[in-house]
Image (cartoon, rainbow, N blue to C red):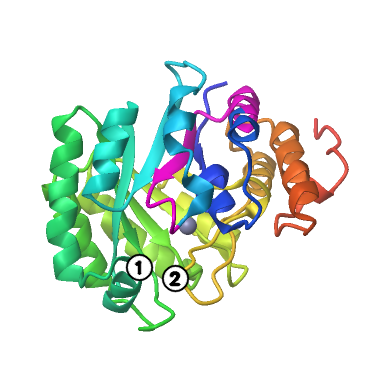
Amino acid sequence: MIPEVILEEQGLRDGLQTLKTIVPTEKKLAWIVQLVEAGLRRIQVASFVHPRLVPQMADAEAIFQQLPQRDDVVYSALVLNQKGVERAIAAGARHLAISLSASDTHSQKNTRMTLEEAKADFRVNVQLARAHGIRVRAGIQCAFGCRYEGAISPQRVLDLVKHHLDAGADEIALADSTGMAHPVQMRHLVRQALDLCGAVPLALHLHNTENKGLANLLAAYEVGVRQFDTAFGGLGGCPFIPGATGNIATEDTVHFFRQMGVETGIDLERVAAISREVEALTGAQLSGALYKLPPLLPTS
Ligand code: ZN
């Protein structure tokens, strides 16, 4: 069956970067193999950021060197600056996530740049990546609210969508980095963003900080979004956002869609096995629900 929605697994990047325990490269690679076997066709496997700032991502090059060679899987990496793009090019990355924050305050804390500075920097990085044949997913963090600034003007977000499209983005991603979005806001903003995007795919990156992740996902699905970021066990969170917690859990999202008759092409038990390993490794329960439950009974 052809999947009707695409889930991009973020557990290895957004998820693991929040853990103090450094996961060995071999273990990450084993999880990548498991995720591919589970049916994931988009996996963010690393970020090319300074290893001192994010020690968990210090093995980005080693990961790219040893990825399972699959034509049908998109392996992406996150980059924050030109140095990151250069490292990603050298490592042979074919797909990069490059983003900026709709909130000036978050932008300054995360990158030490104002939004205007970040926009100029973003364009340079996108051009560099595209000149090397790399596809770029252009993201907007804090698109639905900021812990420092509160509400973010929808017009500001839509202007950034236009900015990203003009810069040559192959895809746009709106991130609810703070988990502040609600379904009515989601429906409204996403509908307008989809209009601007036209044939360019629009993805959503949702955090479940206020327990509204799946409600927001459904609202976005109902107005036409077909691509979502999720993380095994619901791991994740930005270190520069107070109280930030995990992404929506891959297993929970697969189950949620399946119950509604929407196919993701993903075997949730295989993903849940990874979440249980992470739990054993860290000694702490993750926020996802499904991986804690016994295997689901067949529904038909
Ligand atoms: Zn995130």
Residue 262's label in the rendered image is none
The three-letter code of the residue at mark 1 reads Asn
Could you say whether the residue bearing mark 1 is in a helix, strand or loop? helix
Q: Residue 141's image quarter?
A: bottom left
Q: Which of the two residues, 46 or 231, is positioned nearer the viewer here?
A: 46
Is 90 on the left or on the right of 61, as rendered?
left
Residue at 62%, 48% in the rendered image: 22
Q: Above or below — where is 250 with respect to 243?
A: above
Q: Quadrant of the C terminus?
A: top right
Pinpoint residue 47: horizontal percent, then vertical percent.
41, 45
Q: Quadrant of the N terminus?
A: top right
**In this picture, which residue range is highlighted in magenta?**
30-53
CA–CA distance in space, label 1 to label 2: 6 Å
The three-letter code of the residue at mark 2 reads Phe
State if disc 2 and disc 1 touch (CB < 8 Å): yes
Q: Pick out the residue farthest to the bottom.
A: 149
Question: Can you identify the residue that label 1 sits on?
Answer: 110
Question: Can you identify the residue that label 2 sits on?
Answer: 240
Q: Above or below — where is 171 with respect to 240?
A: above
